[in-house]
Structure formats: C-alpha cells, structure tokens
Image: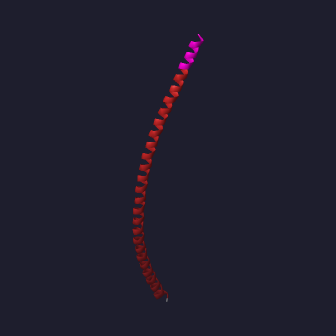
C-alpha cells in the first residue's frame, strides 16, 4: 500500500513539474510575442515622431513667412497713421494758430 501511495505522489509530482515546464514555455512564447510587438511599436512611434518633426519644420517656415508679411503690413499701417497724425497736427495748428 505504501508503494501505491509513493507512486501516486510521484505521478502527481511529475504532473506538477510538467505543468511548470509547460507554463514556462508558454510564458516564454508570450514574452517573445510581446517583445516583437514592442519592436513594431517602437518603429511606428519613431516613424510618427519623424512625421511630426517634419510637420513642425513646415509649420515654422509658414509662421516665419506670415511673420514677415505681418511686419510689412504693420509698417504700412504705421506709415499711414504717421501721415494721418501729421495731417491732424497741421489741421489743428492751422485752426489753433
């Protein structure tokens, strides 16, 4: 009877260790899949980063172009305001004078 008990314990132990090895190989397989997905994701993120950087460069160029156009328009408005101010000053001087 003791031999049967030890045989049952040995079978249970073998099944337990077999399960551990099976689960270990499954975990290794999943780890490999996760690593592969991480590598793909890194590539996609790098690609998106490059696209965002190029869009930022284009946006900077457009803003610089708009800035120069706005400066020239502000200069024109300043010139018009200076001319109008001179005319108002001349008009006030004529009548106050």
The structure residue drawn at horizontal position 44% and vertical position 49%, both measured from the top left corner, is: 42
Residue 45, percent from left and from top: 44, 50
Q: Quadrant of residue 4?
A: top right
The structure residue drawn at horizontal position 43% and vertical position 43%, both measured from the top left corner, is: 36
Give the magenta range. Answer: 1-11
Given residues 29 and 79, the one toward you in this image is 29
Above/below status of 69 relative to 82? above
The single residue placed furthest to the right in the displayed view is 2
Secondary structure mostly seen in magenta is helix
Given residues 1 and 67, the one toward you in this image is 1
Residue 26, percent from left and from top: 47, 32
The structure residue drawn at horizontal position 40% and vertical position 76%, both measured from the top left corner, is: 76
Above/below status of 60 relative to 24? below
Above/below status of 94 relative to 31? below
Q: In which quarter of the image is the N terminus?
A: top right
The single residue placed furthest to the front in the displayed view is 3
Magenta span contains residue 7:
yes
The structure residue drawn at horizontal position 45% and vertical position 83%, both measured from the top left corner, is: 86
Residue 27, percent from left and from top: 49, 34
Magenta span contains residue 2:
yes
The single residue placed furthest to the top in the displayed view is 1
Residue 73, percent from left and from top: 40, 73
Given residues 6 and 52, the one toward you in this image is 6
- Is residue 2 found left or right of 86 in the rendered image? right
- Judging from the image, the colouring scheme is secondary structure
């Amino acid at each position: 009877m003791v031999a049967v008990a030890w045989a049952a314990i040995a079978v249970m132990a073998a099944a337990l260790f077999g399960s551990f090895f099976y689960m270990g190989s499954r975990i290794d397989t999943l780890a490999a899949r996760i690593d592969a997905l991480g590598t793909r994701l890194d590539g996609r993120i790098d690609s998106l980063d490059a696209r965002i950087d190029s869009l930022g460069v284009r946006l900077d160029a457009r803003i610089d172009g708009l800035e120069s156009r706005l400066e020239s328009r502000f200069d024109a408005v300043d010139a018009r305001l200076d001319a109008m101010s001179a005319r108002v000053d001349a008009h006030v001087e004529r009548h106050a004078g």
